[in-house]
Image (spheres, rainbow, N blue to C red):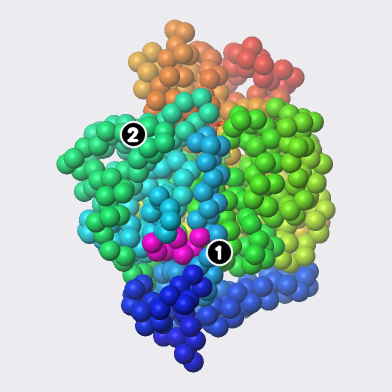
Amino acid sequence: MLTPVNGDSIVPDVLVGKGVTNDVFQNQIKRPLFNQKEHAELDEFILKQTSIGNQKYQDSLRRSLEEPEEFWAEIGRCVTWTKPWDKVLDNTNEPFTKWFVGGELNACYNAVDRHVLAGHGDKVALIHDSPVTKSIRHITYFELQDKAKFTVFDYQVSKLAGALAKMGVSRGDRVLVYMPMIPEAIIAMLATVRLGAVHSVVFGGFAARELRVRIEHAEPKVILAASVGCEPNKIVRYKDILNEAIATSSVKPLHCIIYQRYNVEVAELDPECDMLWDDAMVMSDPHPCVPVEANDPLYILYTSGTTDQPKGIQRPVGGHIATLAWTMHAIYGMGKNDVWWTASDMGWVVGHSYICYGPLVYGITSVMYEGKPDRTPDPGAYFRVIHEHGVNAMFTAPTALRVIKRADPEVKYGSQYSTKSLRTLFVAGEHCDYDTVAWAQRMFHVPVLNHWWQTETGHAITAVCIGFSHSLNPPKYCAGLPFVGYDVHVLRPDGTEADRNELGRIVCKLPLPPGTMSTLYKAPERFLQVYFSKYPGFYDTMDAGFIDEHGYVYVMARDDDVINVAGHRLSTAALEDVVLSHPDVGDAAVIGVPEPTKGEIPLCTRKTESNIIRELVRMVRELIGPIAAFHVAAAVTGLPRTRSGKTARKSIADLARNRFVKISGTIEDPTVYKEIKAVLQKLGYAKTAPDPQ
Ligand code: COA
Ligand code: AMP
């Protein structure tokens, strides 16, 4: 337990003069305390870590790799620990690397309470901008933590944590969150980690089957869901989808807490298992933060791999929140009074890291947007949000920019708003074409900076770092320089190092820095096999790319059977699984083909004689979800299969992209390519592709 030093006041500004003493406040919130001075020092410290410029970058990168214990100990200080670590790095069981071993902390304390204790309770933590419900909510750090005054909403993370505790949730238990883009999703996440429990957020665009798979794997004690989500063209009935998932699941939660969106549509509850969010709040007391060990899991986040079983990325708490807080300045150049906006979904890693934990642990204002780039109500929406909330930097997926560019290339809607508060626009999630970058730079009047990362890493592997004064005019198409902590290499298939500018597999030398995944939940063997078996001593990113003579990294495409549709990562195997479940389909291969707005969409070639495209589209929407954007399929009589039974998907994808395909000697029947090429051409692909040989 930490106590205030020198008798400093720890009472938040809003309570000063209202008879609240240090003791009363400390009792009321019942949790370990730091004093204001220490918090101010921590904030200063983060800024100092990165403020010197390019030499500082080279030095930091070198030190992070060559003197990791010393370097990461400094970064560890970006957050508040209730118990200092015994050892910075334990790499005795690589790749199950541990950072800040023995240290104890709580993520919710760092994201909420410590800012209140430091006197920043009045600062706005979240701005929820929801054109789909025509509402804007501002939530301060104090409101997040404790009783919200003069408002109909009850935001208290501490009370929701109390409700979860009453339902039996404790350290290490899993809590599943299935919600649209509303602040309650973040409150649910923070309340879970306040107890030392582990959240698993499931993206709202997934269908009941995908939700069921995640419930069965994570075995949550409690599920927190909203009644509905709002899409421009429809109401998504989250509660009905949840009911269906639970009904077919072999694992049943003890309870569900349902947040009714009274202003949209009210769902019917099951009195046996469901409890209203409001009732849960009323019936519970605030719960203190429960410190956990640095390597305890903060959350599980499922992502698509090369099989139809999603991988549960397990994130360690200590290294992750320390690194995220630091990146807010090191990469994104955020000052302590800035407004930050990540236009992504809480269901993706980008939402976890940079709508919730990064900005909140760093203590700034984070905008959460429940809308689209174009139809809510028009393509000026992003410009309005920047103008209205004074956004200083934002982060989105290239596909969102392409949506605006397609709908309003001259920015007629956007030009009525000012973007003068904006300094930088970051993009990631998929390959970004230079046309879109150049267009966005002209229209938003700021540098558009590409960076590369993955669910597995939780923050950028390569970036143009504002905090390290990297050039804001990097080479076209690159994704920046390796971020501190990553020893990035490009390898040839035989494992030898590729030359500069030579395309190969991008890998990172072990150990990975703090904050990256610690394992795959309940699947350590799969963790070893998927990421570390092909190139021993390296983390295999499964992305293809190259490094130029100046050290800039270029990421071209996934090198495995994963496709990227509008920034959503999808497994071709999962799509094939659905298609194959149709009685008329004998065999199928799904590949990604280029699409101007979404970057890539799935295309299915399958062995069948009947015309069942509509049925297949319906099945994929029902079983995977509409985000798969599946609508292109064609019948063939044969598929390229190797003698060991593997489908040579990459060769079909190459053919569709007009690339030369050299037929591997292991393909059983090379004649199938002739028909496949003809079929692709009918669909508008492979127009100039040479015949495979
Ligand atoms: N809940 C329920 N349904 C959802 C949903 C959600 N959270 N998100 C999308 N959907 C539905 C849409 O309504 C649509 O349904 P429809 O086919 O019946 O019309 C379908 O899924 C396809 O959605 P999407 O491909 O996402 O298109 P969109 O027009 O709804 O959104 C973008 C366009 C650019 C906003 C969206 O693709 C996006 O946010 N992409 C970036 C993803 C991302 O952030 N990745 C992380 C890296 S930054
Ligand atoms: P996800 O784990 O869903 O965030 O998806 C990660 C994948 O998205 C990476 O493996 C890449 O294939 C792709 N990706 C992310 N950022 C970029 C980028 N800047 N350029 C190219 N591809 C990217």
Who is closer to the viewer here, 149 or 349?
149
Q: Quarter-wise, where is residue 416 in the image? A: top right
Residue 266 numbered mark, or none = 2
Where does the image place residue 227, in percent across and percent down from the top left?
A: 35, 37
Mark count: 2
Which quadrant of the figure contains the N terminus? Answer: bottom left
Q: Earlier in the sequence, mark 2 or mark 1?
A: 1
Q: Is residue 77 above or below residue 506?
A: below
Question: Quick check: can you spot residue 536?
Answer: no
Tell me if 388 is positioned left or right of 135 in this view. right
Instruction: Please check the rendered image and state whether residue 382 is part of the magenta-colored stretch, yes or no.
Output: no
Who is closer to the viewer here, 624 or 256?
256
Q: Give the distance between the C-alpha atoms of the residues marked 2 and 1, in whole angstroms.
A: 32 Å
Tell me if 101 is positioned left or right of 566 in this view. left
Looking at the rendered structure, the secondary structure element under dot 1 is loop
Q: Is residue 196 above or below residue 413?
A: below
Q: Residue at x 67, y 19 (%)?
A: 685
Q: Quarter-wise, where is residue 28 in the image? A: bottom left
Name the dominant secondary structure of the magenta segment: helix
Residue 288 numbered mark, or none = none
In this figure, which residue is indicated by the disc labeled 1? 123
Q: Residue at x 65, y 24 (%)?
A: 656
Label 1 CA crowd tier, 10 Å (few <14, some 14–19, many 20+): some
Q: Amino acid at mark 1?
A: Lys
Where does the image place residue 164, in percent across and percent down from the top left?
A: 28, 57
* Segment tinted magenta in the rendering: 140-147
Q: Is residue 60 above or below residue 531?
A: below
Q: Residue at x 67, y 56 (%)?
A: 462
Tell me if 59 is positioned left or right of 296 in this view. right
